[in-house]
């Protein structure tokens, strides 16, 4: 019976991983002739020996072809791809507008931590609009009062005109040599700035130990280069999804997920502390200047143990360019310790 459950978690995680790595890619002539089943898990896979190395996929364009990042073992050989076609990327769905607000208790009082710092959280911006029917007419009740509803405020990122890329596209400086003192083209005016949201997906699976991996501390690391010419302010890094599973086929959903930010020419907002009890994940905020390369780490605590995960983080690629990805020190130590002392 246990092998049956193991097979369920294996196929679920591998299916998500396969989609991340191959799902958006066009089939090559070679694999088209042999059929797509070559990329799917086979019945002959030994469940106890199944491993998927830590791998990152980013530059997905929220629907366009994915660019696979480096695996954990390749991190020392990673290099920046300076030919990304971010100017052709558009979002398939409207992006919710968010704002950082103070956390309050039931009486409306602002909540502070033990150090006296005001606690904040990121929430969707809403507005009250009139309800309309299919013809666009305002709907009223029997008393003649206009019906209203509360909706999220959204925005749709727009692709830049390729003809204007040299002067208005935030990606233009990235196409220059990193060793140059200044970009080859003028940075975009602040008024021309348009955010383009993207995802960075990390996935990993190791069932060879017939058990879970337990560690706390530094989990994942993403290094961002802050693009030149962007407005000062906060650029959030947020959890888009967290699919984590244990050897016993139990979903390890964090009880607390704390988002972070890259604060450009300013100080990041105070972040909540990790919970004293209960599984927690936290994206650590950092401050930076345009042109800087910064390390954004994802920490975890009170880890209940797991053997596989697929985690997605959302960021603004108009402001931030991923230049390196790898497992955090505590994650690496945990998986290498178990493997080397088998």
Image (cartoon, rainbow, N blue to C red):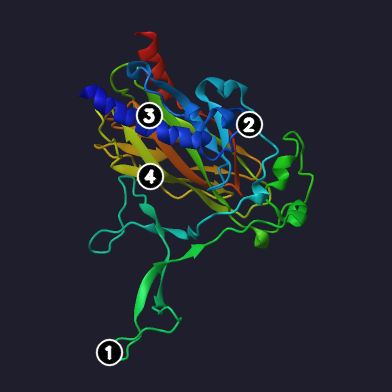
Residue 157 is situated, as x and y percent measured from the top left of the image, at 58, 58
Considering only order in the chain, which callout, 4 or 1, is on the residue closer to the N terminus? 1
Q: Residue furthest bottom?
A: 143
Q: What residue would you read off at disc 1?
A: 142
Q: What residue would you read off at disc 2?
A: 29
**Residue located at (27% from left, 64% from top):** 108
**3D distance between C-alphas at marks 1 and 4:** 46 Å
Could you tell me which secondary element the residue under label 2 belongs to?
helix
**3D distance between C-alphas at marks 3 and 1:** 59 Å
Residue 262 is situated, as x and y percent measured from the top left of the image, at 53, 45
Judge depth for marks 2 and 4 and give the one in front.
2
Q: Could you tell me if the residues under marks 1 and 4 are in contact, i.e. CB atoms within 8 Å?
A: no
The answer to which of 124 and 49 lies nearer the viewer is 49
How dense is the environment of label 4, judged by Cα within 10 Å: few (below 14), some, or many (20 and up)? many
Residue 143 vs residue 61: left or right? left
Q: Could you tell me if the residues under marks 2 and 1 are in contact, i.e. CB atoms within 8 Å?
A: no
58 vs 194: above or below: above
Residue 31's disc is: none
Residue 275 seen by the camera: yes
Residue 258's disc is: 4
Considering only order in the chain, which callout, 1 or 3, is on the residue closer to the N terminus? 1
How dense is the environment of label 2, judged by Cα within 10 Å: few (below 14), some, or many (20 and up)? few
Considering only order in the chain, which callout, 4 or 2, is on the residue closer to the N terminus? 2
């Amino acid at each position: 019976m246990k092998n049956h459950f193991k097979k369920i978690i294996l196929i679920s995680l591998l299916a998500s991983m396969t989609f991340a790595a191959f799902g958006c890619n066009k089939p090559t002539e070679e694999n088209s002739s042999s059929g797509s089943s070559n990329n799917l898990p086979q019945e002959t896979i030994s469940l106890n020996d199944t491993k998927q190395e830590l791998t990152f996929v980013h530059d997905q364009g929220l629907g366009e072809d994915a660019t696979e990042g480096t695996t954990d073992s390749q991190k020392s050989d990673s290099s920046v791809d300076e030919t990304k076609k971010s100017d052709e990327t558009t979002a398939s769905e409207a992006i919710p507008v968010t704002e950082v607000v103070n956390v309050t208790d039931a009486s409306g009082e602002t909540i502070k931590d033990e150090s006296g710092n005001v606690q904040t959280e990121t929430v969707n911006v809403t507005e009250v609009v009139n309800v309309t029917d299919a013809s666009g007419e305002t709907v009223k009740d029997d008393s003649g009062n206009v019906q209203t509803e509360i909706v999220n405020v959204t925005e749709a990122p727009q692709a830049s005109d390729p003809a204007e890329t040299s002067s208005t596209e935030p990606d233009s400086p990235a196409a220059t040599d990193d060793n140059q003192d200044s970009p080859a083209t003028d940075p975009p005016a602040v008024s021309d700035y348009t955010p383009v949201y993207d995802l960075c997906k990390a996935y990993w699976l190791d069932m060879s130990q017939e058990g879970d991996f337990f560690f706390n501390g530094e989990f994942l690391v993403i290094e961002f280069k802050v693009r030149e010419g962007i407005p000062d302010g906060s650029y959030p890094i947020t959890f888009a999804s967290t699919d984590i599973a244990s050897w016993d086929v139990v979903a390890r959903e964090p009880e607390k997920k704390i988002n972070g930010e890259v604060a450009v020419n300013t100080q990041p907002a105070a972040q909540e502390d990790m919970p004293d009890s209960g599984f927690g994940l936290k994206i650590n905020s950092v401050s930076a200047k345009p042109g800087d390369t910064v390390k954004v780490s994802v920490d975890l605590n009170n880890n209940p143990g797991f053997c596989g995960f697929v985690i997605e983080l959302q960021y603004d690629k108009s402001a931030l360019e991923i230049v390196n990805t790898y497992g955090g020190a505590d994650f690496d130590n945990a998986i290498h310790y178990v493997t080397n002392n088998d």
